[in-house]
């Protein structure tokens, strides 16, 4: 039993060492700036929304990586007046921030591209910011209360259908998990059988 324990312990240590080496290697590869060039990525960071009510604000982050040694120009735009958009270059040279304020209902496309000196697009990306319609704008207090009362009533009326749908989904997931669990348990049992037969 002592030999088996040593064998198991040495296997665990070897596996831990391999995981640590792989993690360090992956981190070194990521930090070596092996980014696809040219490329552009337009996105919202965690906590920033792409669907806004009129008057709300959000921020869009834009990263761009031109090809080394190739002359380029930057073009950026917001194509709909439903948003006020201000582009600001950050201290880091390949980062822009677009500060967006929702003005009126619609969809605003914020685009960003790298072009060569002849105007050919080398890399391009965009994001849509949706400004939601505000149906209660201009309503009196009584009209707003009636509007929300109807919304709440419709929600509660839809609960039985939602419960039925969720029940079906949970049963399906439980069935699939039980099938997968049975297969996984058989594999684990086989692995332990081989491990302790050494």
Image (spheres, rainbow, N blue to C red):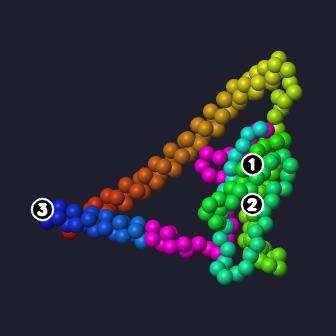
The x and y percentages for residue 137 are 84, 30
Q: Are marks 3 and 1 in contact (CB under 8 Å)?
A: no
Between tags 3 and 1, which lies in front?
Answer: 1
| Residue 38 in magenta stretch | yes
The x and y percentages for residue 85 are 78, 51
**Which residue is outermost to the top?**
142
Q: Which residue is mark 3?
A: 2
Between discs 3 and 1, the one toward the N terminus: 3
**Which residue is outermost to the front?**
91
| Residue 190 in magenta stretch | no
* Numbered range of the magenta stretch: 27-54
Q: Which residue is mark 1?
A: 100
Helix, strand or loop status at disc 2: strand
Instruction: Measure the alpha-carbon separation of dots 3 and 2.
Output: 62 Å
Q: Residue at x 84, y 41 (%)?
A: 104
> Is there any visible trace of residue 140 in the rendered image?
yes
Pick the quarter of the image with the C terminus. bottom left
């Amino acid at each position: 039993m002592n030999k088996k324990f040593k064998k198991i312990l040495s296997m665990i240590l070897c596996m831990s060492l391999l995981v640590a080496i792989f993690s360090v290697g992956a981190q070194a590869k990521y930090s070596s700036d092996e980014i696809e060039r040219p490329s552009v990525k337009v996105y919202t960071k965690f906590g920033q929304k792409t669907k806004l009510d009129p008057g709300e604000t959000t921020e869009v982050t834009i990263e761009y990586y031109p090809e080394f040694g190739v002359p380029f120009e930057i073009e950026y735009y917001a194509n709909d007046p439903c948003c006020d958009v201000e582009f600001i270059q950050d201290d880091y040279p390949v980062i822009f921030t677009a500060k967006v304020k929702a003005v009126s209902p619609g969809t605003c496309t914020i685009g960003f591209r790298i072009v060569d000196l002849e105007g050919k697009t080398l890399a391009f990306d965009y994001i849509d910011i949706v400004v939601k319609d505000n149906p209660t704008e201009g309503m009196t207090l009584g009209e707003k209360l009636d509007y929300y009362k109807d919304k709440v009533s419709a929600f509660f009326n839809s609960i039985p259908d939602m419960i039925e749908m969720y029940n079906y989904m949970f049963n399906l997931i439980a069935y699939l998990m039980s099938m997968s669990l049975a297969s996984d348990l058989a594999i684990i049992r086989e692995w332990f059988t081989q491990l302790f037969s050494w």
